[in-house]
Image: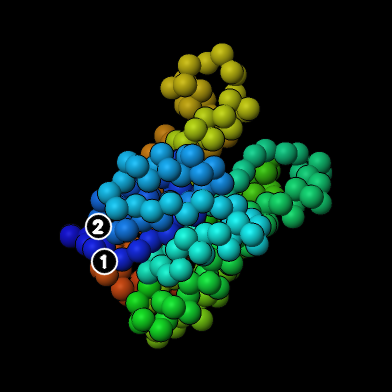
Amino acid sequence: MRLDLSGKTALVSGSTQGIGRAIAAGLSAAGARVAVNGRDAAKVAEVVAGLTGAVAAPGDLSTDDGTQAVLQAVPEADILVNNLGIFGPTPALEITDAQWRHYFEVNVLSAIRLTRAYLPGMRERGWGRVQYLASDSAIAVPAEMIHYGMTKTALLAVSRGFAKEAAGSGVTVNSVIAGPTHTGGVEDFVYQLVDKSLPWDEAQREFMRVHRPQSLLQRLIEPEEIANMVVYLSSPLASATTGGALRVDGGYVDAILP
Protein backbone atom coordinates (compact mmCIF):
# COMPACT_ATOMS: atom_id res chain seq x y z
CA MET A 1 0.00 0.00 0.00
CA ARG A 2 1.19 3.50 -0.80
CA LEU A 3 0.23 6.00 1.89
CA ASP A 4 0.56 9.39 0.20
CA LEU A 5 -0.37 12.44 2.27
CA SER A 6 1.29 15.01 0.03
CA GLY A 7 -0.47 18.37 0.17
CA LYS A 8 -2.15 17.60 3.52
CA THR A 9 -1.57 19.51 6.74
CA ALA A 10 -1.64 17.47 9.94
CA LEU A 11 -1.69 18.70 13.54
CA VAL A 12 -0.59 16.22 16.19
CA SER A 13 -1.22 17.38 19.74
CA GLY A 14 1.41 16.51 22.34
CA SER A 15 3.93 15.48 19.70
CA THR A 16 7.32 16.31 21.25
CA GLN A 17 7.83 12.84 22.70
CA GLY A 18 6.56 9.27 22.85
CA ILE A 19 3.64 8.17 20.69
CA GLY A 20 2.91 11.69 19.49
CA ARG A 21 6.44 12.18 18.21
CA ALA A 22 6.32 8.83 16.41
CA ILE A 23 3.00 9.82 14.81
CA ALA A 24 4.43 13.14 13.67
CA ALA A 25 7.40 11.32 12.11
CA GLY A 26 5.14 8.79 10.40
CA LEU A 27 2.85 11.43 8.91
CA SER A 28 5.85 13.45 7.75
CA ALA A 29 7.38 10.39 6.09
CA ALA A 30 4.09 9.92 4.21
CA GLY A 31 4.40 13.45 2.81
CA ALA A 32 2.20 15.49 5.15
CA ARG A 33 3.12 18.95 6.40
CA VAL A 34 3.11 18.25 10.13
CA ALA A 35 2.43 20.82 12.85
CA VAL A 36 4.25 19.77 16.02
CA ASN A 37 2.66 20.74 19.33
CA GLY A 38 3.85 20.87 22.92
CA ARG A 39 4.04 23.26 25.85
CA ASP A 40 7.83 23.69 25.58
CA ALA A 41 8.69 25.79 22.51
CA ALA A 42 12.31 24.58 22.57
CA LYS A 43 11.27 20.94 22.44
CA VAL A 44 8.81 21.72 19.67
CA ALA A 45 11.58 23.40 17.66
CA GLU A 46 13.85 20.38 18.18
CA VAL A 47 11.27 17.97 16.74
CA VAL A 48 10.41 20.31 13.87
CA ALA A 49 14.09 20.50 12.91
CA GLY A 50 14.18 16.73 12.44
CA LEU A 51 11.16 16.53 10.13
CA THR A 52 10.82 17.56 6.51
CA GLY A 53 8.50 20.52 6.04
CA ALA A 54 7.22 20.52 9.63
CA VAL A 55 6.00 23.65 11.41
CA ALA A 56 5.93 24.64 15.07
CA ALA A 57 2.64 24.98 16.96
CA PRO A 58 3.59 25.39 20.62
CA GLY A 59 0.90 25.94 23.22
CA ASP A 60 -0.81 24.42 26.27
CA LEU A 61 -3.98 22.92 24.81
CA SER A 62 -5.56 22.51 28.23
CA THR A 63 -6.04 26.30 28.32
CA ASP A 64 -7.98 28.72 26.13
CA ASP A 65 -4.92 30.92 25.54
CA GLY A 66 -2.73 27.97 24.59
CA THR A 67 -5.35 26.65 22.21
CA GLN A 68 -5.67 30.04 20.53
CA ALA A 69 -1.90 30.17 20.05
CA VAL A 70 -1.99 26.80 18.28
CA LEU A 71 -4.93 27.82 16.10
CA GLN A 72 -3.10 30.98 15.06
CA ALA A 73 -0.06 28.91 14.08
CA VAL A 74 -2.21 26.36 12.20
CA PRO A 75 -5.45 28.02 10.99
CA GLU A 76 -6.52 24.96 8.96
CA ALA A 77 -5.75 21.26 9.16
CA ASP A 78 -6.71 18.31 6.98
CA ILE A 79 -5.65 15.76 9.60
CA LEU A 80 -6.09 16.20 13.34
CA VAL A 81 -4.57 13.68 15.71
CA ASN A 82 -5.63 14.26 19.31
CA ASN A 83 -2.75 12.54 21.05
CA LEU A 84 -2.18 14.79 24.08
CA GLY A 85 -2.62 12.96 27.34
CA ILE A 86 -1.31 12.63 30.88
CA PHE A 87 -1.35 9.61 33.19
CA GLY A 88 -0.09 8.46 36.54
CA PRO A 89 -1.08 6.12 39.36
CA THR A 90 -3.09 7.40 42.32
CA PRO A 91 -5.12 5.31 44.79
CA ALA A 92 -8.78 5.61 43.82
CA LEU A 93 -10.02 7.23 47.01
CA GLU A 94 -7.15 9.71 47.04
CA ILE A 95 -7.87 11.29 43.64
CA THR A 96 -8.84 14.88 44.38
CA ASP A 97 -11.44 17.01 42.64
CA ALA A 98 -8.61 19.09 41.19
CA GLN A 99 -7.00 15.97 39.69
CA TRP A 100 -10.29 14.81 38.15
CA ARG A 101 -10.77 18.22 36.55
CA HIS A 102 -7.17 18.47 35.37
CA TYR A 103 -7.23 15.04 33.70
CA PHE A 104 -10.47 15.91 31.94
CA GLU A 105 -9.15 19.29 30.78
CA VAL A 106 -5.94 17.84 29.35
CA ASN A 107 -7.07 14.47 28.00
CA VAL A 108 -10.60 15.20 26.82
CA LEU A 109 -11.45 18.88 26.55
CA SER A 110 -8.27 19.70 24.62
CA ALA A 111 -9.37 17.24 21.93
CA ILE A 112 -12.90 18.65 21.86
CA ARG A 113 -11.57 22.18 21.45
CA LEU A 114 -9.42 21.22 18.47
CA THR A 115 -12.17 19.17 16.84
CA ARG A 116 -14.59 22.06 17.21
CA ALA A 117 -12.03 24.35 15.56
CA TYR A 118 -10.98 22.18 12.60
CA LEU A 119 -13.95 19.95 11.76
CA PRO A 120 -16.05 22.70 10.09
CA GLY A 121 -13.26 23.49 7.61
CA MET A 122 -12.76 19.82 6.83
CA ARG A 123 -16.48 19.44 6.08
CA GLU A 124 -16.48 22.48 3.82
CA ARG A 125 -13.54 21.08 1.85
CA GLY A 126 -15.12 17.63 1.69
CA TRP A 127 -12.13 15.77 3.14
CA GLY A 128 -10.57 15.33 6.54
CA ARG A 129 -9.35 12.95 9.20
CA VAL A 130 -9.88 13.29 12.95
CA GLN A 131 -8.43 10.78 15.37
CA TYR A 132 -8.35 10.36 19.14
CA LEU A 133 -5.67 8.37 20.94
CA ALA A 134 -7.60 6.24 23.38
CA SER A 135 -6.21 3.36 25.42
CA ASP A 136 -6.89 -0.14 26.63
CA SER A 137 -7.59 1.68 29.91
CA ALA A 138 -10.81 2.96 28.34
CA ILE A 139 -12.17 -0.59 28.47
CA ALA A 140 -10.12 -2.35 31.13
CA VAL A 141 -9.97 0.53 33.61
CA PRO A 142 -6.87 0.11 35.79
CA ALA A 143 -7.48 0.22 39.54
CA GLU A 144 -4.39 2.36 40.06
CA MET A 145 -5.53 5.19 37.75
CA ILE A 146 -9.26 5.27 37.22
CA HIS A 147 -9.15 9.03 36.55
CA TYR A 148 -7.02 8.30 33.48
CA GLY A 149 -9.28 5.42 32.40
CA MET A 150 -12.30 7.70 32.69
CA THR A 151 -10.82 10.18 30.24
CA LYS A 152 -10.01 7.48 27.69
CA THR A 153 -13.52 6.04 27.93
CA ALA A 154 -14.83 9.56 27.37
CA LEU A 155 -12.74 9.87 24.19
CA LEU A 156 -14.48 6.81 22.71
CA ALA A 157 -17.81 8.57 23.17
CA VAL A 158 -16.46 11.87 21.84
CA SER A 159 -15.05 10.13 18.77
CA ARG A 160 -18.27 8.28 17.95
CA GLY A 161 -20.34 11.44 18.47
CA PHE A 162 -18.20 13.61 16.20
CA ALA A 163 -18.21 10.85 13.57
CA LYS A 164 -21.98 11.27 13.45
CA GLU A 165 -21.56 15.02 13.18
CA ALA A 166 -19.27 14.47 10.17
CA ALA A 167 -21.54 11.90 8.49
CA GLY A 168 -21.65 12.10 4.70
CA SER A 169 -19.10 14.92 4.52
CA GLY A 170 -15.99 13.04 3.40
CA VAL A 171 -14.49 13.46 6.87
CA THR A 172 -13.76 10.36 8.92
CA VAL A 173 -13.50 10.32 12.71
CA ASN A 174 -12.01 7.41 14.63
CA SER A 175 -10.29 6.51 17.86
CA VAL A 176 -7.20 4.34 18.21
CA ILE A 177 -7.01 2.12 21.27
CA ALA A 178 -3.34 1.90 22.16
CA GLY A 179 -2.10 -0.83 24.45
CA PRO A 180 0.78 -0.61 26.95
CA THR A 181 3.44 1.28 24.99
CA HIS A 182 7.16 1.80 25.52
CA THR A 183 7.71 5.52 26.09
CA GLY A 184 9.83 7.51 28.52
CA GLY A 185 6.77 8.29 30.60
CA VAL A 186 5.80 4.63 30.73
CA GLU A 187 9.30 3.67 31.85
CA ASP A 188 8.84 6.00 34.82
CA PHE A 189 5.40 4.49 35.44
CA VAL A 190 6.75 0.94 35.30
CA TYR A 191 9.39 1.77 37.90
CA GLN A 192 6.69 3.11 40.20
CA LEU A 193 5.18 -0.37 40.24
CA VAL A 194 8.19 -2.73 40.12
CA ASP A 195 11.61 -2.95 41.79
CA LYS A 196 13.61 0.14 40.74
CA SER A 197 16.87 -1.82 40.91
CA LEU A 198 15.87 -4.11 38.02
CA PRO A 199 17.43 -3.53 34.58
CA TRP A 200 14.88 -2.21 32.07
CA ASP A 201 14.32 -5.49 30.19
CA GLU A 202 13.64 -7.34 33.44
CA ALA A 203 11.48 -4.51 34.79
CA GLN A 204 9.40 -4.51 31.61
CA ARG A 205 8.85 -8.28 31.77
CA GLU A 206 7.94 -8.09 35.46
CA PHE A 207 5.50 -5.24 34.80
CA MET A 208 3.77 -7.15 32.00
CA ARG A 209 3.68 -10.38 34.03
CA VAL A 210 2.22 -8.84 37.18
CA HIS A 211 0.26 -5.80 36.03
CA ARG A 212 -0.68 -6.56 32.38
CA PRO A 213 -0.80 -10.38 32.24
CA GLN A 214 -3.61 -10.45 29.66
CA SER A 215 -1.40 -9.00 26.92
CA LEU A 216 -1.05 -11.48 24.06
CA LEU A 217 1.99 -9.62 22.76
CA GLN A 218 3.69 -10.07 26.16
CA ARG A 219 5.82 -6.99 25.64
CA LEU A 220 5.34 -3.27 25.50
CA ILE A 221 4.29 -1.89 22.12
CA GLU A 222 6.72 0.45 20.36
CA PRO A 223 5.41 3.96 19.54
CA GLU A 224 6.02 3.41 15.82
CA GLU A 225 3.56 0.50 15.90
CA ILE A 226 0.83 2.84 17.10
CA ALA A 227 1.88 5.43 14.53
CA ASN A 228 1.47 2.93 11.69
CA MET A 229 -2.26 2.64 12.41
CA VAL A 230 -2.67 6.41 12.72
CA VAL A 231 -0.92 7.06 9.40
CA TYR A 232 -3.12 4.48 7.66
CA LEU A 233 -6.31 6.01 9.11
CA SER A 234 -5.07 9.42 7.96
CA SER A 235 -4.72 8.24 4.37
CA PRO A 236 -7.22 8.09 1.50
CA LEU A 237 -7.06 4.29 1.77
CA ALA A 238 -9.08 4.45 5.02
CA SER A 239 -11.97 6.36 3.44
CA ALA A 240 -14.61 3.82 4.56
CA THR A 241 -13.44 3.57 8.16
CA THR A 242 -15.25 6.03 10.43
CA GLY A 243 -16.95 5.98 13.79
CA GLY A 244 -14.67 3.15 14.84
CA ALA A 245 -12.40 2.28 17.76
CA LEU A 246 -9.44 0.46 16.26
CA ARG A 247 -7.21 -1.55 18.55
CA VAL A 248 -3.41 -1.55 18.55
CA ASP A 249 -3.29 -3.09 22.00
CA GLY A 250 -1.28 -6.27 21.52
CA GLY A 251 -4.40 -8.29 22.30
CA TYR A 252 -4.58 -6.78 25.77
CA VAL A 253 -8.37 -6.34 25.85
CA ASP A 254 -9.99 -9.77 26.10
CA ALA A 255 -12.83 -9.07 23.69
CA ILE A 256 -13.50 -9.24 19.96
CA LEU A 257 -15.02 -5.75 19.96
CA PRO A 258 -14.06 -2.75 22.13
Residue visible at 29% across and 59% down? Answer: 32
Which residue occupies 32% across, 58% down?
A: 33
Judged left or right of residue 147, residue 11 is left
Residue 106 on image: x %, y %: 63, 54
Label 2 with label 1: CB-CB less than 8 Å = yes
**Element type where label 1 sits in the image:** loop
Identify residue for label 1: 7
**For the residue labelled by badge 2, is the local secondary structure a helix, a strand or a loop?**
loop
Image check: 191 left or right of 101?
Answer: left
Q: Amino acid at mark 2?
A: Gly
Q: Taking the image as drawn, is residue 132 in sight?
A: no
Asked whether residue 7 appears in the rendered view, the answer is: yes
**Disc 2/disc 1 C-alpha distance (Å):** 7 Å
Q: Residue at x 68, y 52 (%)?
A: 103
Where's residue 162, x and y in %?
52, 75
What is the number of the mark on residue 31?
2
Identity, as a three-letter code, of the amino acid under mark 1: Gly
- Marks 2 and 1, the one that precedes in the sequence: 1
Residue under the point 41% across and 77% down: 122
Q: Residue 247 at what x, y percent from top left? A: 43, 55
Instruction: Answer above or below: position of 182 versus 166.
Output: above
Image height check: is 108 above or below 128? above
Q: Nearer the viewer, residue 258 or 113?
A: 113
